[in-house]
Amino acid sequence: MARILVVDDSELELSILQKAFRKLGDWNPEYVTSGTAALECLRREEFDLLLTDLHLPEMNGLELLAEARELRNGLPVVIMTAHGSEELAVEALRQGATNYVVKKKICRDLPQIVESIVRAEQRTRQQSRLLQFLDQEDFRFVIPTDLSLVQAVIVYVQNVARRISGVSESVLSRLGIGLEEALLNSIIHGNLEISSELRQDCSDTYRQTIAKRVRERPYCDRQVTVSVSLRGDQLTCQITDEGPGFDVNAVPDPTTPEYLERPSGRGLLLMRSFLDAVEYNSKGNRVTLFKKLQRASESESRRQSSAATCDAEEPVPCVC
């Protein structure tokens, strides 16, 4: 049975809403008369939907919408609007409201709107639960030579690993670092054919050359293919660029003391440190990464499940 939090300070309107919800049958509405009371309920309990009037004492519907989204990220919010509040309803939709219903048509429209939203949310939650039991997945990206996409690919791979394998956050972090170095190498040193030797001095030549070549042919026309396979707790990622490649055997061991402070080889050092295995093809334009996904401990799983899931702003990949 879905739980719905209803916010309206008019006794007449609440009476009308009660009649409308009787048509829904299997929903469980709870009624409050202010935004403050609504927030108190949201702090204590879980609800499937928030239905609120725009005009409320203490705080209006837009303010409640903002607070509710902060408190319960992903909670669907439906705005009730009267004649003359159309602009506010549009603003509410811009700020993240899921839908709106006109009060004078509430008995006719509300049951269908609420049922549609709640059923969709329940399907989403069921799908998320089902994915926890998914044992394998394969996908592939073919991306342009665009550094701004690197973090997006990393986040996607991490999210797949997180939902399928219950992998610990520390392992995901190390996986992300290894993926970032491999992707940056494929784009900068592979497709753009820029040597890391340009990073030896303190000038901006390295960055300037990157900025120049991402707009020049043939460099800007090249792509990077990222193929990921997840089998149980084993993740395999193959990254292929369209550059000329390099002699893998000519690359010095980045772990030797004389190379630790040099920028060249740093990416390979991090990849080998944070991943279980790193293999190149003979041409040197394809790298295969292997990572065993260690599951989170019970205590860490609880911390992860209670943490906020909203995405942070993606950082720009480091090319310094």
Image (cartoon, helix red, strand yellow):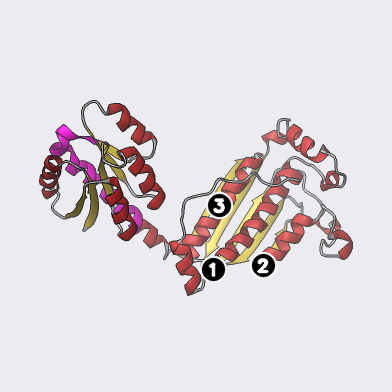
Instruction: Tell me the tag on residue 152.
Output: none
Q: Is residue 304 left or right of residue 318?
A: left
Under mark 2, the amino acid is Asp
Q: Is residue 279 above or below residue 5?
A: below
Q: Quickly name the residue at label 3.
A: 155
Kindly report the distance in space between the C-alpha atoms of the residues bearing marks 1 and 3: 18 Å
Precedes in sequence: disc 1 or disc 3: 3
Task: For the N terminus, give its image quadrant.
Answer: bottom left
Q: Is residue 285 left or right of residue 297?
A: right
Q: Residues within 10 Å of mark 2 (few under 14, many from 20)?
A: few
Q: Is residue 122 left or right of residue 232?
A: left
Q: Nearer the viewer, mark 2 or mark 3?
A: 3
Under mark 1, the amino acid is Asp
Give the quarter of the image for residue 129.
Answer: bottom left
Q: Nearer the viewer, mark 1 or mark 3?
A: 3
For the point 76% across and 51% down, which residue is it?
A: 283
Characterize the magenta stretch by its predominant secondary structure.
helix
Towards the viewer: 317 or 219: 317
Is 291 colored magenta in this rendering? no
Under mark 3, the amino acid is Val
Q: Which residues are magenta?
A: 101-126
Instruction: Tell me the tag on residue 276.
Output: 2
Q: Quickly name the residue at label 1.
A: 233
Q: Position of residue 141 (x, y in %)?
A: 57, 46
Kindly report the distance in space between the C-alpha atoms of the residues bearing marks 1 and 2: 13 Å
Is 121 colored magenta in this rendering? yes
Task: Verify CB contact (< 8 Å) between mark 1 and mark 2.
Answer: no
Q: Secondary structure at mark 1?
A: loop
Give the quarter of the image for residue 259.
Answer: bottom right
